[in-house]
Image: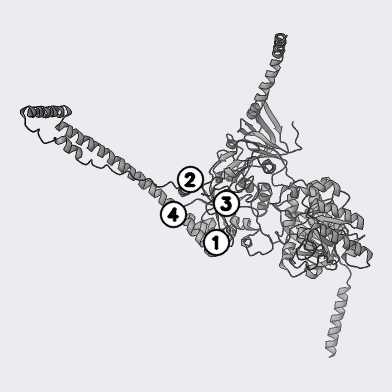
Amino acid sequence: MRLRTTALLGFALAGALHGTAPLAAQDLRVIRAGSFINADGQLQAEALLILERGNIKQVGGTAPAGATVDEYPGAVVAPGLIDIHAQLGAVDNLAERQAALQPAATAADAFDRYHAHLAAALRAGVTTFVLAPDDSNIVGGTAVICQTAGPEGKPALLNARGPLKLSLSPTAFQTRREPTSRSGALGMLRDALAAARKSSGVDGLAVLRGSPVPALITAPSAADVLALLELSKEFEFKFVPLHTADARALAGELRGAVPGVVVGPLNFTSPPRLTTAAGVLEEAGVPVAIQGGLPQQAADSLRTAAAIAARDGLSLPAARRAISTVPAALLGLGERLGRIDAGLQADLVVFSGDPLDLRSHVLAVYVGGRRVWMSHH
Amino acid sequence: MHARTTAALARAGRRQAWPFGLLLALAFGAPAAAQMRSYLITNGTVLVGDGTRIESGDVQFSGGEISAVGKELKGQLLTKKINAKGKFVTPGLIDVWSSVALRSGGGDAKATGRAIDAFDRFADDELNAALHSGVTTAFIPARSGRALGGFGSVVRLTPGASRADVLLKEEAGYCSALGDNAGEGPIGRAKALRELSKQFQAAKDYRQALEDYDEELKEYEKKLKEFLEKEAGKDGKREGESKPADGEKKEERKDDRKKDAGRKGEAPPSDGGRAEDKKDEKKPEGPKKPEAPAKDRVSEALLKLIEGEQLWRVEAARPADIQNALDIAKAFNLALVFDGARGAHTLAKLIADREIPVVLAAPDAGLLYTGGPERYEDPHAVAILKDAGVRVFLASGAAASRHLPLLAAQAVGQGFTPDEALQRLTADAASLLGVDKQVGKLAKGLSADIVIWSDHPFAPGARVERVFVAGREVYRASDQKDE
């Protein structure tokens, strides 16, 4: 009896001590590679990143003695890719279509962390994505920000309070319930915003006003965007348009009026007016984020879309930022994700070359400083 | 006054005539001069197209043809020099399967149409978009979705050119689409396959019928000759027995006899003479002329495949269709090329053993399982096929030729070397399409289809700066100034 108690006490003590052990050099991890993508989206030579407790401690300098060094000669370290609008693992589960206004709904309830597509996205370098309600409702609900590999190495929610998702897409105009047309939709939206302004609720619409995180709104045509600009001024909220077919035509008007525009999904059959939109927006001074087409398109659709936009006018640094820095900023996570800089979370993807170079492929993925996947090539 | 004015005008006219005449000469002469214009591109990284690379290389061309490729070439008089320092110079890229400027159709109801008839050579936007990506030549299929589609054509992508200038090869392959009819089910597919086999067999029978007809025709002609000779001989013999003069004489004698008889009071001789008897005799029938087989244009088209004159380009929707195509090709000894064979990677070894080239476009592969033939798509199809030893080509397929360099870059990520991938878009593509005497390489005597890039075509930031087709500048990026 005594022996057992002693043994138990001994184990407990050992466990307690282990948890409070001081930080040793071996808790640091160092990545050394050919080059990395800096905060401006440029390729910078001599990548040496020191990671500590899940964050990037230092960029550049020398590796501390005794630290584990992961070597990737000739490779490029990029910030973990962020897909600002995806339906990974939750297609067809992302809307309650009975009523077009669902401000209290949240995509968190549809998040399936065991879905195989999440692993496929991770292997393609996507470390963070926004799971957003789809376009069936005018006010779809709150989108959630997810990681394809969380602290336990499994997919996890990063932030359940993501941007609000709205939609003026024709799929929201249904015959069985309101609205059935765009004018009906705008009317409903206006009424809902007015009601939310008066109420003291805490649902998505109520907190929209003055929120630092802009709403994501599907606005297929220029007219939708202009109508939303009016509403946003009247009800004092910020928004980011998605899926705008005529984004090019609006470039001048959008500058300064929206915190950014989401371009995509793009693939090899997208028409020029979509693939050249990103370049035109950049020239007009509008921040551009690019979304992939997950899961309807292939796992690497995010970086293929960026490469296509880069071929058709978007500058290379802006294209690299469009799948990392800009989405992070639009989600209000600019101080935590999306850049390789001291103090930010160590979500990193090591590519065999420039991520915009379709000849390159993913070598390794780190989330929160841990290597969660490595290629076997 | 009228006369004076006219005279004055005439004098004035003569004074102004010669500058006007000069202007006319220049106006007409200038385009002709531009055609004949000679260019010399200097100091670029020249990628010849067959794997050779020339650092600080020069390319000279005039009159539509490349005259020299090498280093330190000397320009001729009136040669326009283009400094390509820091740039890459390649042959115009060739898209071996593209829908650029292709309007619906491309095959008429009788399945003997030509894709060139559906090619809209006035679609400047699409053509310029292709030139913007460095693509100067394309094979456009007769896309019909049917088992017998029609002939695909090889075209030059030159905005505003005449049909003759655009057409590089009118019949460059016979196109079939197998299994495209969704919802047919397995029975429908089996039926379609049997129909197709029957068509090919009918073509062979038609050939046999034509050959038989030829034989019969020769026989007939021989017999006819003999018959005519025999007839002529017979007539000659009869004539020998009773020559016309004798016959007349005989008639005279008959008449004389009649007269004599009449004078004498006797009845005229009763026999009408052997001549009448001979007239009543039946004429012998000549040999019967054989009937030609009815003209069968579909069989004529398919015979070009059977006789190896044309490639058989098959779009197969799924592995079962691929196997069907392989079987038919084997049975009729056809030169098969797969265009976008979905699921070909599952039959990679079989295709490699039969040495059949496979042309792949960008995979349609999403992560979602759809249950349709899309489930056979695989983003690694290129790698799997290449590893098995299949000759893989990269093309645009149902898209216009706007992203060919990106597709090729993706292929490099899947196991091609950059040189191999570029070669597939130039020299190898030209060989496949049978136009390697005209395009596909930067070599003396070939058409001056040349592209100048700001960087290696597969590098992320590479931009096409200038494009020449047949020695004429057809595209220039907006930021390129004249030197």
Question: Separation of disc 4 and disc 2 at Cα?
Answer: 17 Å
Residue A197's place in the image compared with B264, above or below, is below
Vertical relation: B403 (above or below) A111: above
> Where in the figure is residue B215, as x and y percent of width and height?
34, 45
Where is residue A25 shown, x and y percent of the image? 85, 64
Residue assigned mark 4 = B201
Residue designated by label 3: B144
**Marks 1 and 4, how far apart in space?**
21 Å
Q: Which mark is residue B309?
A: 2
SS class of the residue under badge 2? loop
In the drawing, what numbered circle is on residue B320?
1
Q: Chain of mark 3?
A: B
Residue A287 lies, in percent from the top left, at 84, 51
The image shows residue B109, relative to residue B181, as above or below, that is above
Q: CA distance from mark 1 to mark 2?
A: 27 Å
For the residues labelled 4 and 2, say whether their Cβ atoms are less than 8 Å apart: no
- Label 1: how many residues lie within 10 Å, few (<14), some (14-19) or many (20+)? some
Q: Are marks 1 and 3 on the same chain?
A: yes
Q: Earlier in the sequence, mark 4 or mark 2?
A: 4
Residue type at tag 4: Gln
> In terms of secondary structure, where does tag 1 sit?
helix
Q: Is residue A9 left or right of residue B404?
A: right
**Residue type at mark 3?**
Ser
Would you identify the image quadrant in which residue A299 lies? bottom right
